[in-house]
Image: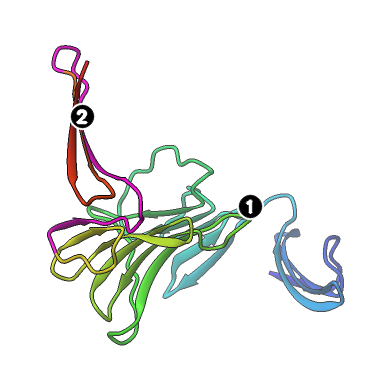
Amino acid sequence: LMLSTACSWLSENIKLEKDNAQIGALGSNSASGVPVFDISTHPTSGIMRMLTSGSERMRIHSDGNISVGQTANVSKFNIHGGSCTYGTVSSSFPLTIGNNGNSGLSIISSGTTNAGMIVFGDSGDNDTGKIRYDHSDNSLRFSTNASEKVRIDSSGNFGLGTTSPGYKLEVADDTNTTVNLLRLRNSDSTYSQTWDFSLNTVKNLRPVVGKS
């Protein structure tokens, strides 16, 4: 291993060589006037490995993809918990988690009154969709278009359109119009039929049966 101050791809640096070949460099640079400390492999090839206790734990591949727990290049960020065979991973899913047997993701909140969330956003709204588990009342909540639409409470009651379901299934729509609540449909070519249930403005539950 040789240290040198001359390097073709970083300025003000320390060049690392092995067998007279450049393998990496440490250097400094600036981005928009902010000082930057650079750690670099060779610019045209090479990987960066991190080891503990003599074993590789993490690898940054030459294309920038990161692998934790294995050496294979699977996705933009791959967390590998054990023996697992990966098929073709879509570039639309930059995070990949693999394990031997069951695999999953844990979201742990401190205390018993906080919440764990998975949030979905776009260029117009950073949290337009949300899955939220609230530890204060042990409810699971689902939001679309930036508002809660479904809640399962701690007793297992399922509420659609209500945040406090009092029945195993409660469907609510608090508007002063006829509300379509439920549709049951069989699209079989012989027994095709549809049952629609709605509440009208005089508070009557109306089943409407149609058959084609």
| Spot occupied by residue 42 in the image (x, y as percentages of width and height) | 72, 57
Disc 1 vs disc 2: which is toward the camera?
2
Q: Nearer the viewer, residue 86 or 196?
A: 196
Of the 4 image quadrants, the one containing the N terminus is: bottom right
Residue 171 highlighted magenta (yes or no): yes
| Residue in the image at 86% along x and 60% along y | 8
**Up/down of 69 relative to 93, above or below:** below
Of the 4 image quadrants, the one containing the C terminus is: top left
The answer to which image quadrant residue 183 occupies is top left
Question: On the rendered structure, is 173 left or right of 189?
Answer: right
Question: On the rendered structure, is 52 left or right of 29?
Answer: left
**Up/down of 185 relative to 20, above or below:** above
**Up/down of 139 relative to 21, above or below:** below
Name the mark on residue 62.
Answer: 1
The answer to which image quadrant residue 55 occupies is bottom left
Amino acid type, callout 1: Ser
Q: Nearer the viewer, residue 152 or 211?
A: 211
Task: State the extent of the magenta-drawn residues as a range.
Answer: 167-191
Amino acid type, callout 2: Arg
Task: Please give the residue where the numbered disc 2 appears in the rendered image.
Answer: 185
| Residue in the image at 53% along x and 43% along y | 91
| Residue in the image at 35% along x and 76% along y | 115
Q: Nearer the viewer, residue 205 or 102?
A: 205
